[in-house]
Image (cartoon, rainbow, N blue to C red):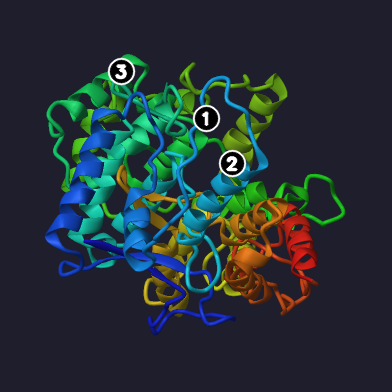
Amino acid sequence: MWRLKVAEGNHPWLRTTNNHVGRQVWEFDPNFGSKEERDEVERAREVFRANRFQMKHSSDLLMRLQFARLNPLELDLPVIKLGENEQVTEEKVTTSLRRAISRYSTLQADDGHWVGDYGGPMFLLPGLIISLYVTGALNTVLSPEHHKEMRRYLYNHQNKDGGWGLHIEGHSTMLGSVLSYVTLRLLGEGANGGDGAMAKARDWILSHGSATAITSWGKMWLSVLGVFDWSGNNPLPPEIWLLPYILPVHPGRMWCHARMVYLPMSYIYGKRFVGKIKTLVFELRKELYCIPYDRIDWDKARNECAKEDLYYPHPMMQDILWATLHKFVEPVLLHWPGNRLREGALNTVIQHIHYEDENTRYICIGPVNKVLNMLCCWIEDPSSEAFKLHIPRIYDYLWIAEDGMKMQGYNGSQLWDTAFSVQAINATGLVEEYAPTLFKAHNYVKHSQVLEDCPGDYVTGTVTFLKEHGHSLQQIMAGLFLTALLKD
């Protein structure tokens, strides 16, 4: 049975600045839980499966069942049920609020924060699985139980038409469908497995243009795996990081999540890295395309995009720029003497990657660049300390509920949820009654503020979802200030 562990970290390759306060990791323990509890978990899974098309979101029942066992609640407050024309009184409202806060307080972790699911996107887990597969670490890092729950998650969020969306509520897209299909295959599912679900997914992919119509992030991941040719990608030249910062096109001026994703992507593209070609890769080359792999027009594939994925058409100038880089600039940079500039750019990029890794304790700003940075460290040196430091932080991103195991959009939203929870409790006017809950929350907030600067950058005093994460978030800053004022 799966067990949630909070504020723990005894791995030799884990680094911490606050004794792992806020860290939440699921571990499988075959001896954990009674038969009745295991049966209850299975019932929750069956109910979700039966209603998956009507209710896309889980109710976090595995977490709630564990906290109900750890923090049993005995209420002597009556359940308030109002008739259609019954008067709403202060007493009835206050009683309902006390019941709600008492229940909510049982979901507070020992370190003071509230835990919960932060999943939804369907393009996160595939990047992790592909990275672990090409580095040869898939079956070392993830147990058979991890594989089982990840397959459960992917099947539970497959749409009726056989495809997968960009997120769990989305219509089927080529990006979601191809990456989810590939992930299931890498996790051990057969081409015709899942009681017909895999065949249905493959039919959706082939009937909507095949994997050549996947979007740019998908083209990149498939190229890493070896089921898409790098010549079918529009250029991501690492040399752009050598431009003077004063220029408006320098990637350092991009939105943080854009630049921190395209940083490692440019390294992988510059290296044209491809994992070891295994039997499964050859099988996927046959399964994902309408024509033989060696007959695909990769230059045409560069700009192909399924209509289900195309939210905004490419401007002509963008296509002209990409064509120029692809046909004229890249050939120069791949051969002497241009390859010396490419080598210098790659060295600059990997230094930026290491800076990001070290200052986030290898959590990184988010799940996309987390797995990309990890892959870059392995490409640079498969035996490197950096790659080893990345491994234990993978588990920080994994969350399990009755719908299966997913990769979260962050390593949690701990401080954000805690700040909102404190504000909500304060708004009821019942602060004194729930002082122990609020003091625990305040203690968590106190241990979550960033107190160290990154080399060359001033960040002391800022806050983020989790202190180890390191990247400041202004909306959390506002909540933190209000939370601190409420405590005072």
Position in image of residue 354 (x %, y %): 58, 70
Q: Provide the secondary structure element on which disc 3 rests.
A: loop
Instruction: Identify the mark at residue 92; answer none if there is no mark.
Output: 2
- Do the residues bearing badges 1 and 2 touch, measured as CB atoms within 8 Å? yes
Crowding near the residue tagged with mark 1, few <14, some 14–19, many ≥20 C-alpha atoms within 10 Å: few
Between 273 and 158, the one nearer to me in the picture: 158
Give the spatial CA distance, label 1 vs label 3. Answer: 43 Å
> Which of disc 2 and disc 1 is earlier in sequence?
1
Number of residues whose C-alpha sits closer than 10 Å to that of mark 2, classed few (under 14), some (14–19) or many (20 or more):
some
**Quarter of the image where the C terminus is located:** bottom right
Callout 2: SS: helix
In the image, residue 213 lies at what x, y percent? 43, 24
Residue found at x 63% / y 73%: 439
Q: Is residue 235 left or right of residue 124?
A: right
Query: Which residue is the extreme one toward the right?
Result: 246
For the question of whether residue 34 can be seen, the reply is yes
Q: Which residue is mark 3?
A: 161
Q: Which mark is residue 82?
A: 1
Of mark 3 and mark 2, the one earlier in the sequence is 2
- Which amino acid lies under the numbered mark 3 shown in the image of this protein? Asp
Q: Is residue 194 left or right of residue 203?
A: left
Q: Which one is nearer the viewer's eye here, 91 or 145?
A: 91
Residue 278 visible in this rendered orientation of the protein: no
